[in-house]
Image (cartoon, helix red, strand yellow):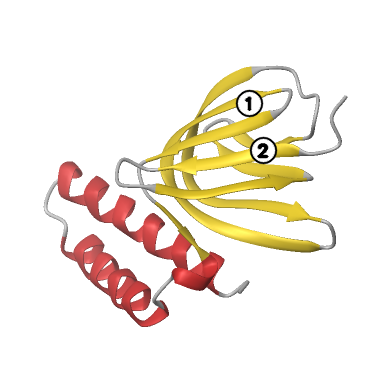
């Protein structure tokens, strides 16, 4: 069994991250899951949230905006709609996005507008949560 696992995070625009890590914990649609080296293979859908991983004693965090995860014994591949590492998040912009989403939620006239505003709010909250762990 390998001692490390390769983590690749890819969006439609770019490769966000490629690191050899000790553990990956991701926001699966059916709940958070962890992957260690030698993990049984599986695929799952990701929800908006925080992905975290550890290299030695240091932990890092990435805001994931949905997508899919493929877990294999020696690697985890995240195909994300969007992803941002904590250090790259503009906190002021994320706070402004949260405020806009909250206003849109309050003013929503139908279920489609409400769902769209709620999704925007979840994304902003995920970004802020990850940014504070920098």
Q: Quadrant of the C terminus?
A: bottom right
Image coords of residue 52 (percent x, y): 65, 53
Residue 32 position by quadrant: top right
Question: Furthest residue to the left?
Answer: 109
Identify residue for label 1. Answer: 71
Question: Furthest residue to the bottom?
Answer: 92
Asked if 128 appears above or below 4 in the picture, the reply is below
Q: Secondary structure at mark 1?
A: strand
Residue that appears at 61% across and 36% down: 31
Rate crowding at label 1 as few (under 14), some (14 to 19) or many (20 or more) other CA atoms within 10 Å.
many
Residue that appears at 67% across and 38% down: 6
Residue that appears at 68% across and 44% down: 25
The foreground one among 10 and 131 is 10
Q: Secondary structure at mark 2?
A: strand
How far is the residue under mark 2 from the one under mark 1? 10 Å
Circles 2 and 1: CB distance less than 8 Å? no
The foreground one among 42 and 2 is 2
Between marks 2 and 1 in the image, the one whose residue lies nearer the viewer: 2
The foreground one among 103 and 83 is 83
Rate crowding at label 2 as few (under 14), some (14 to 19) or many (20 or more) other CA atoms within 10 Å.
many
Image coords of residue 108 (percent x, y): 16, 57
Image coords of residue 118 (percent x, y): 31, 53
First in residue order: circle 2 vs circle 1:
2
Residue 42 is marked as none
Residue that appears at 38% across and 57% down: 123
Identify residue for label 2. Answer: 6
Image coords of residue 102 (percent x, y): 29, 68
Q: Quadrant of the N terminus?
A: top right
Asked if 109 appears above or below 127 in the picture, the reply is above
């Amino acid at each position: 069994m390998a001692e490390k696992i390769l983590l690749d995070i890819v969006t439609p625009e770019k490769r966000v991250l490629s690191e050899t890590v000790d553990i990956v914990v991701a926001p699966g649609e059916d709940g958070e899951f962890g992957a260690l080296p030698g993990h049984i293979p599986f695929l799952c859908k990701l929800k908006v949230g925080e992905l975290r991983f550890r290299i030695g004693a240091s932990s890092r965090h990435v805001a994931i905006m949905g997508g899919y995860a493929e877990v294999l014994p020696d690697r985890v591949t995240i195909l994300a709609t969007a992803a941002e590492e904590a250090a790259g998040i503009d906190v002021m912009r994320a706070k402004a996005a949260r405020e806009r989403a909250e206003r849109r939620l309050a003013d929503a006239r139908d279920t489609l507008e409400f769902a769209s505003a709620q999704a925007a709010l979840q994304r902003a909250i995920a970004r802020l949560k990850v940014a504070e762990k920098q």
